[in-house]
Amino acid sequence: MKTTLKISCVLLFAFASITKAQHGESEKYSSNNTKAIKAYKTGLEYYNARKNEKALEELQTAIKKDSNFIEPYIIMANIYAELREYEQAIAAYAKTFQINPEFFPNNYFYAGTMEAGVANYDIAAKHLQKFLSYDNRNPEFKKLAQQVINNCTFARQAIEHPKPFKPLNMGENINSPADEYFPSITADGQTLLITRDIKDTRALEGHQEDFYISKKIDNKWTAAQSVPGVNTPGNEGAPSISADGRIVFFAACQEIDASYGEKRTGYGSCDIFYALKNGDRWTKTGNIGQPINSRNWETQPSFSSDGKTLYFIRGTVTREGIKDQDIYSSQLTDKGTWGVPMRLSDKINTSGTEESVFIHPDNQTLYFASDGHIGMGGLDIFMSKRQANGEWGEAVNLGYPINTNTDENSLLVAPDGDIAYFASNRAGGYGGLDLYQFELYKEAKPEKITYVKGKVFDSVTKKLLNAKFELIDLETSKTVIESESDAGSGAFLVCLPVNKNYALNVSKNGYLFYSENFSLKNLADASQPFLMDIPLQAIDTGMTVELKNIFFETNKFNLKEESQAELQKLITFLNYNKTLRIEISGHTDDVGDKKLNQQLSQNRAKAVYDFLITHAIPAERLTYKGYGDSLPKLSNSIAENRAKNRRTEFKVIAK
């Protein structure tokens, strides 16, 4: 997760394999100087004992005795690579090429991959092409060499055509002398959750990861505060906060000792956990369980704004470490349980490493890091758009200088799509990794979204209520988002991707449901959210509900297809409340002939009545009536009011 140099190859190899490849079992060397050979052998002994400093001293002695002795340069290059002193390793390889270009062809592979890692793309491509010119090379090395060559070509072109990128440190309220990384944000852009690596004497390593939260007030982030109820003496990292801020998913890889008053166990080396928010308090954390968690390594969750899908990283645990990191997703079933995780397609996942997955609140744009796609080398940040058939499109590199020759990951894109956040240890920060923000260029932006936000309450008692929300695409009648208002505060937030028309239904047992519609196909300004508080009426005789998602053509009474979702909601409501009897009423404005208006309203009410009858609602529970323009909600003096007066309602006439 923290920035490291990108060296996309395995450079460490045993001395036995080197000697066999270079001069067989007979220990013939490129030098005849016995003192040089003796120093070289001593250096190897120190190297195999992992005493690198002494090994380098002996290898330097060997070179002083014979400056054309190639083997010491190779071992020195290996040591410098282990120490991450790549420029010195490259210089050692260059010396071997100068002495004898044909001595050990694999040196071109090792040198080329390192040169690409330090952004020496031209010489890297030259050396790797030279490596590929030899026969009988390791097939895996040949495959990797070609990929690095492709990366070099891409990198040169990307540098020649840079993307706009002006990172700005997020300031002392977010950053500290400790490391901050893995940000997550709510769909209204007002709550930021970050991971901070803090000192903790209770932790086994003297430090641990905790979550900190900041609120945006007057367009400024408040000082980040620890999150009680979620943070523990163990590590919590890589959070994903739900669109409404009520659920947080996170990764934890360490058990908590029971002496701290809590025991946290998992299914594998790292698992995904969650916590729920009730009012201002977070519940005790819980393991999300199988089938998402397994004996493998699960981490870095990202929860979709529709409340249905969890994306995460799964890797295979081996003796050598974590391998085969890919992006998976799991869907919530109708029973409220998580489905079997599915690996995303090969347009996203590669034979390399994928991590830092982030699904934007538009639910159409996926950002992730990968070293398997063509890029600047190592981990670059990519994006993919969901296609019309539901599949993910080709991965697109975000370009230079967002991606460089150092690892990039942990990208977060704000809900409005304009600002992106990332972690960096670049100079000028507050210490270690800091969080930065920058304006995202047009081609890398997600789809536009807005949101509806408010509280649900009892219309009479004003008690705050926990209610169910359904956002329905009126064109397809499919439910695209399911959510609930907070049981403690009654607060809700539902994302509204633009360019569609939606029905919003709010329901709670014992109450009449509430309906609203949002036409976003020609929305002028997506930055302006819909702010509304929703009063729910307890079921009682005489109570009326306006069916805002029942639609007719002008001056006609045929139900439009977009009415299906609302009609199904009414059927469900009546089937659940089997003793209710209702009157369906139609209403018009005062434009035109009153008699014709009354007849039109009567026919529209009957159309809804007939639909319910054909869907097994008993006729004795239903009546219908047209009121024409006799019961206006508002004055008919302006067009906007007249549109609101044209409506369909139902009234409870018996419980």
Image: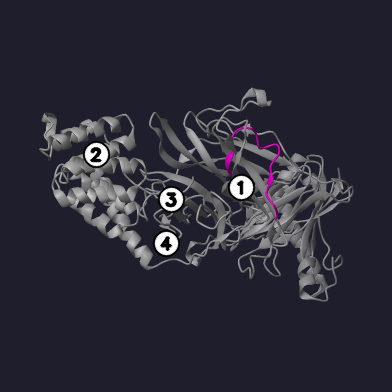
Q: Which of the two marks, 4 or 2, is nearer to us in this view? A: 2
- What range is drawn magenta here? 222-241
Question: Disc 1 residue type?
Answer: Ile
Residue ID for mark 1: 194
Disc with the residue nearer the chain's start (2 vs 3): 2
Question: Disc 2 residue type?
Answer: Leu
Residue ID for mark 2: 59
Residue 357 point in image, percent of width and height: 50, 47
Q: Helix or strand or loop: what does disc 4 sit on?
A: loop
Q: Helix or strand or loop: what does disc 3 sit on?
A: loop
Q: Which of the two marks, 2 or 1, is nearer to us in this view? A: 2
Q: Residues within 10 Å of mark 4 (few under 14, many from 20)?
A: many
Are the residues flagged by discs 4 and 3 in contact, CB closer than 8 Å? no
Disc with the residue nearer the chain's start (1 vs 4): 1
Disc with the residue nearer the chain's start (1 vs 3): 1
Q: CA distance from mark 4 to mark 2?
A: 40 Å
Of residues 205 and 421, the one nearer the viewer is 205
Residue ID for mark 3: 407
Q: Residues within 10 Å of mark 3 (few under 14, many from 20)?
A: many
Q: How many marks?
A: 4
Mark sitting on residue 400: 4
Residue 556 point in image, percent of width and height: 69, 67
Residue placed farthest to the top in the image?
Answer: 259
Colour scheme employed for the rendering of this structure: one colour
Which corner quadrant holds the C terminus?
A: top right
